[in-house]
């Protein structure tokens, strides 16, 4: 399963632990919207290419 985590406020302890735990059995992608230069077209493409999207 392909999972996408979208971080709104930057990385944190809980999201990091969950991403790490899920990485063992799934393909996990993380997009941090608090970073400069995030391509919103890439975010939309990632959302539609993943099976589940988790927003933090």
Image (spheres, rainbow, N blue to C red):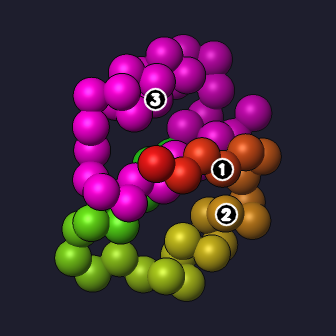
Mark 2 to mark 3: distance in Å? 16 Å
- Element type at marker 3? helix
Res. 39 image quadrant: bottom left
The magenta span reads 1-28
Disc 2 packing (10 Å; few <14; some 14–19; many ≥20)? some
Q: Which residue is drawn at 27% across and 28% down?
A: 13
**Quadrant of the drawing holding the N terminus:** top right
Q: Do the residues labelled 1 and 2 touch (CB within 8 Å)?
A: yes
| Circle 3 residue | 19
Mark found first going from the N terminus, 3 or 1:
3
Query: In the rendering, at what x and y percent does residue 4 appear?
Result: 58, 48
Is residue 33 highlighted in magenta? no
Query: In the rendering, at what x and y percent does residue 7 appear?
Result: 40, 53
Mark 3 to mark 1: distance in Å? 12 Å
Mark found first going from the N terminus, 1 or 2:
2
- Element type at marker 2? helix
Mark found first going from the N terminus, 2 or 3:
3
Q: Residue at x 39, y 33 (%)?
A: 15
Q: Which residue is drawn at 35% across and 67% down?
A: 33
Residue 1's tag is none
Residue nearest the observer in this picture, 48 or 14? 14
Residue 53's tag is 1
Left or right of 49 on screen, residue 9: left
Vertical arrangement, residue 34 with respect to residue 41, above or below? above
């Amino acid at each position: 399963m392909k999972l996408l985590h979208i971080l709104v406020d930057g990385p944190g302890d809980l999201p990091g632990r969950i991403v790490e735990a899920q990485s063992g059995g799934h393909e996990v992608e993380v997009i941090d919207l608090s970073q400069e230069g995030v391509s919103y077209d890439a975010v939309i493409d990632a959302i539609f290419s993943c099976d589940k999207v988790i927003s933090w």
